[in-house]
Amino acid sequence: MTATALRAQINWWRGCQRAYDRTGYQYFHTTNQTASKEHVKILVLGGGSGGVAMGARMKRKVGAENVAIVEPSEMHYYQPIWTLVGAGAKSVESSGRPTASVIPSGVKWVKSRVTEVNPDTNSVRTDSGKEISYKYLIVALGLQLHFEKIKGLPEGFEHPKIGSNYSVKTVQKTWKALQDFKEGNAVFSFPNTPVKCPGAPQKIMYLTDAFLRKTGKRSNANIVYNTSLPVLFGVKKYADSLWEVVKARDLTVNLRHNLIEVRADKQEAVFENLDKPGETNVFKYEMLHVTPPMGPPDVLKGSPLADEAGWLNLNKETLQHNVYPNVFGIGDCTNLPTPKTAAAVAAQSGVLDRNITRIMKKSQPDKTYDGYTSCPLVTSYNTVILAEFDYNGQPLETFPLDQSKERRIMYYMKADVMPHLYWHGLLRGLWGGPGPYRTLMHLGMK
Ligand SMILES: Cc1cc2nc3c(=O)[nH]c(=O)nc-3n(C[C@H](O)[C@H](O)[C@H](O)COP(=O)(O)OP(=O)(O)OC[C@H]3O[C@@H](n4cnc5c(N)ncnc54)[C@H](O)[C@@H]3O)c2cc1C
């Protein structure tokens, strides 16, 4: 090699080193100079509630240039508000912001879908063919909706009278069906799988009842909630209050009923009776709200990171992976045995922040997630029962009031305060749940 060629080679390497120092990314060129591999210290998979929150927290710990988030969607949605969108109390536009505006500044947004996770080589692959290696991985991939597991869906949504608050594509159809209601059955379903926000399938029932009363149509309506579960709600304290609401408003609840088919052209919904295999019941409907079956993301299922059911296999206290110590998780994609909510994500984000930081410093995780989750059970256009509880189903209430009662103040929290906490607190890594406020409000007794 001539002296000039050697100098050029050295300059090229120096250039690469400067680029690496500036961006935190290292580019390994292959012989054809087209394919590239990237490396980042902390890689976050998914830019939803949990992914953005952890991106913001990790940026503060290791610097923006050492964090990347893989997320394919252009828009980020505050999903909890869809309950009110489906009932016409909020606009769908208010639920979304461009993803670019919520990715923490300086953090790299890899606008792709992860197609393969290889924890044995500390790397992932994306649908654009890129391979990204990491030192620490945070999995925040959410869950998948499976409308297609119900015969007749999703194509049934092309017909009127049917909607679902669970997707941005179908939430406005709920509001349309509600407005078009004349007389007959309003039917609501809850599937035979884990779901996110298990209160949401019945919140829209209470709002439907309230809307039909307000518009003078309630006497023409028969409101039916068909749930696969053997209970109305998983925590007795709140379930007891909800049964009272159901009785007072003359709502019909059928337990262990699972939606298996929608004949949208005939306005018929077919439910199987889970306690009597082979028995099905057909409900004619004037309005149908579908909560679809849900499951783990495809990329997790069958990967070394998943448990037998396909969910991310975590230590339920530390949120560290049970097999790969440099892998962590948060939110709906995990196998944490607590209802999947944004409130749970908030509480998990504080625990995860602390534990990853300690592990990066070669210490042991010392913060424990107690399973905190919360469900604002909207029971009308101005009342909410605010359920808050832990892994054991023990109420963990923030306010020094009996939260199992319907309250106006809690509706205000749900409709106006929580969206602000989400956009300006959780997503910026500044809101780790109400734990400290609970202690304060209960004068240090809780
Ligand atoms: C109708 C409704 C009502 C709700 N009500 C409430 C409520 O009142 N209170 C409450 O606390 N919670 C509520 N929730 C639940 C709450 O919205 C979720 O639990 C929370 O958003 C979960 O956050 P996450 O980060 O785990 O998942 P998400 O926020 O769903 O984010 C997952 C992200 O991963 C991305 N992703 C998926 N696959 C890939 C891939 N292969 N590669 C890269 N990225 C990928 C997705 O695009 C998505 O952005 C409600 C949800 C719904 C739908």
Image: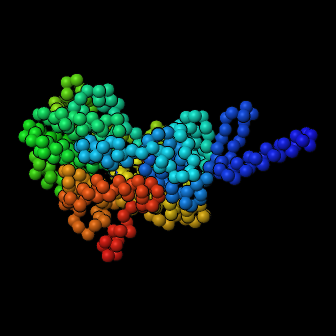
Q: Quadrant of residue 192?
A: top left
Does 29 sit above or below residue 355? above
Does 320 sit above or below residue 173? below
Which quadrant of the rendered structure holds the N terminus? top right
Q: Residue at x 43, y 50 (%)?
A: 49
Which residue is more in the foreground, 320 or 183? Answer: 183
Q: Residue at x 56, y 64 (%)?
A: 358
Q: Is residue 399 visible?
A: yes
Residue at the top extreme of this rendering: 265
Q: Is residue 251 left or right of residue 446?
A: left
Which residue is more in the foreground, 330 or 418? Answer: 418
Residue 112, position in %: x, y? 53, 38
Which residue is more in the foreground, 397 or 414? Answer: 414
Residue at the left extreme of this rendering: 219
Residue 35, position in %: x, y? 67, 35
Tell me how the rendering is colored: rainbow
Residue 105, position in %: x, y? 54, 52
Which quadrant of the rendered structure holds the C terminus? bottom left
Q: Is residue 308 left or right of residue 88?
A: right
Q: Residue at x 92, y 43 (%)?
A: 3
Q: Is residue 93 left or right of residue 223?
A: right
Q: Residue at x 22, y 39 (%)?
A: 188
Q: Is residue 394 visible?
A: no
Q: How many numbered circles are shown?
A: 0
Q: Is residue 288 left or right of residue 308?
A: left
Which residue is more in the foreground, 85 or 435? Answer: 85
Residue at the right extreme of this rendering: 2
Q: Quadrant of residue 373?
A: bottom left
